[in-house]
């Protein structure tokens, strides 16, 4: 099932806004070896990922399962997701693009999670 609601709208707006501004920058060694927490609103979908394609898109079932898990983990004061969302730093305005973890990101937005764990990786040479 494809979500065609505010999530798809937000993704399309983000993709349009950052289409020509998503030049990756290299993160320093400390940034790359440190899992940090960041507001999910500071993360942006990767337009090259099938998650953002209207004909494939995100799965309601997967997102809802992550939302249930996130809410339960917030109540128990546990890390929201076991694995951090993989991101890459963009040159434009110190923004971040998601490389892996789009469903977790969407669930974090829906569950209003204040911070998610992320791991920054550098672009391939």
Image: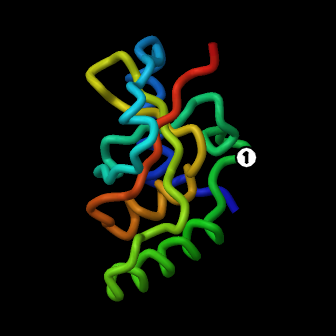
- Decide which of 76, 108 is in the foreground and name it: 76
**Place of residue 120 in the rendered image (x, y in percent of width and height, measured from the top left):** 46, 37
What coloring was used for the rendering? Answer: rainbow
Give residue 103's quadrant in the image.
Answer: bottom right
Q: As displayed, is residue 23 above or below residue 57? A: above
Q: Which quadrant of the rendered structure holds the N terminus?
A: bottom right
Q: Secondary structure at mark 1?
A: loop
- Decide which of 66, 122 is in the foreground and name it: 122
Residue 34 visible to an observer of this rendering: yes
Residue 13 visible to an observer of this rendering: no
The residue depicted at 41 percent of the width and 25 percent of the height is 27
The total of numbered circles placed on residues is: 1
In this rendering, position of residue 75 left or right of residue 14 = left
The residue depicted at 33 percent of the width and 29 percent of the height is 95
In this rendering, position of residue 116 left or right of residue 123 = left
The residue depicted at 60 percent of the width and 45 percent of the height is 100
**Place of residue 121 in the rendered image (x, y in percent of width and height, measured from the top left):** 52, 33
**Place of residue 33 in the rendered image (x, y in percent of width and height, measured from the top left):** 45, 41
| Mark 1 burial class by Cα count in 10 Å: few <14, some 14-19, many 20+ | few
**Place of residue 89 in the rendered image (x, y in percent of width and height, measured from the top left):** 41, 27
- Decide which of 67, 125 is in the foreground and name it: 125
- Decide which of 102, 15 is in the foreground and name it: 102
The residue depicted at 63 percent of the width and 13 percent of the height is 125
Q: As displayed, is residue 18 above or below residue 12? A: above
According to the image, label 1 marks what residue?
56
């Amino acid at each position: 099932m494809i979500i065609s609601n505010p999530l798809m709208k937000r993704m399309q707006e983000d993709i349009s806004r950052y289409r020509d501004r998503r030049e990756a920058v290299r993160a320093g060694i400390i940034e790359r070896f440190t899992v940090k927490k960041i507001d999910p609103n500071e993360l942006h979908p990767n337009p090259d990922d099938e998650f953002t394609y209207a004909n494939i898109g995100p799965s309601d079932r997967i997102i809802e399962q992550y939302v249930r898990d996130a809410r339960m983990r917030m109540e128990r004061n546990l890390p929201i997701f076991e694995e951090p969302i993989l991101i890459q730093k963009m040159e434009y305005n110190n923004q971040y693009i998601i490389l892996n973890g789009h469903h977790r990101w969407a669930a974090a937005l829906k569950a209003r999670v204040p911070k998610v764990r992320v791991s920054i990786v550098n672009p391939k040479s």
